[in-house]
Image (cartoon, rainbow, N blue to C red):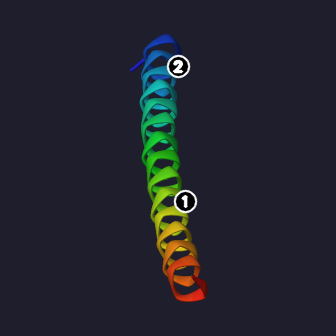
């Protein structure tokens, strides 16, 4: 295998890895958003419960 073919394969591997990294970053971003939304919902529920108790 020549240097050009090896370079082409390495570029392809690099592109594949970058695509995987982007995909994983999107998953992490969605997870963080979901986590924030869940936390906000729990805080809102607690606040509403406390408001009801306080009258």
Q: x, y percentage for residue 54?
A: 61, 86
For image coordinates 43% across by 15% down, the residue present is 5
Q: Is residue 31 above or below residue 13?
A: below
For image coordinates 42% across by 37% down, the residue present is 23
Q: Residues within 10 Å of mark 2 (few under 14, many from 20)?
A: few
Q: x, y percentage for residue 11?
A: 51, 21
Q: x, y percentage for residue 15?
A: 48, 24
Q: Which mark is residue 22?
A: none
Q: Is residue 18 above or below residue 11?
A: below
Q: Quadrant of the N terminus?
A: top left
For image coordinates 45% across by 64% down, the residue present is 38
Q: x, y percentage for residue 24?
A: 45, 46
Q: Is residue 15 above or below residue 52?
A: above
SS under mark 2: helix
- Residue position for label 2: 7
For image coordinates 58% across by 74% down, the residue present is 47
Q: Which mark is residue 36?
A: 1
Taking depth in this image into account, of 17 and 35 the one nearest to the observer is 35
Kindly give the residue lying farthest to the top in the view shown. 4
> Mark 1 or 2, which is nearer the eye?
1
Kindly give the residue lying farthest to the front in the view shown. 55
Cα distance in 3D space between marks 1 and 2: 43 Å
Q: Earlier in the sequence, mark 1 or mark 2?
A: 2
Taking depth in this image into account, of 43 and 24 the one nearest to the observer is 43
SS under mark 1: helix
């Amino acid at each position: 295998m020549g240097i050009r073919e090896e370079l082409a394969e390495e570029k392809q591997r690099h592109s594949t890895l970058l695509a995987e990294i982007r995909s994983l970053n999107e998953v992490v971003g969605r997870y963080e958003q979901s986590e924030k939304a869940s936390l906000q919902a729990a805080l809102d529920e607690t606040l509403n419960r406390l408001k009801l108790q306080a009258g």
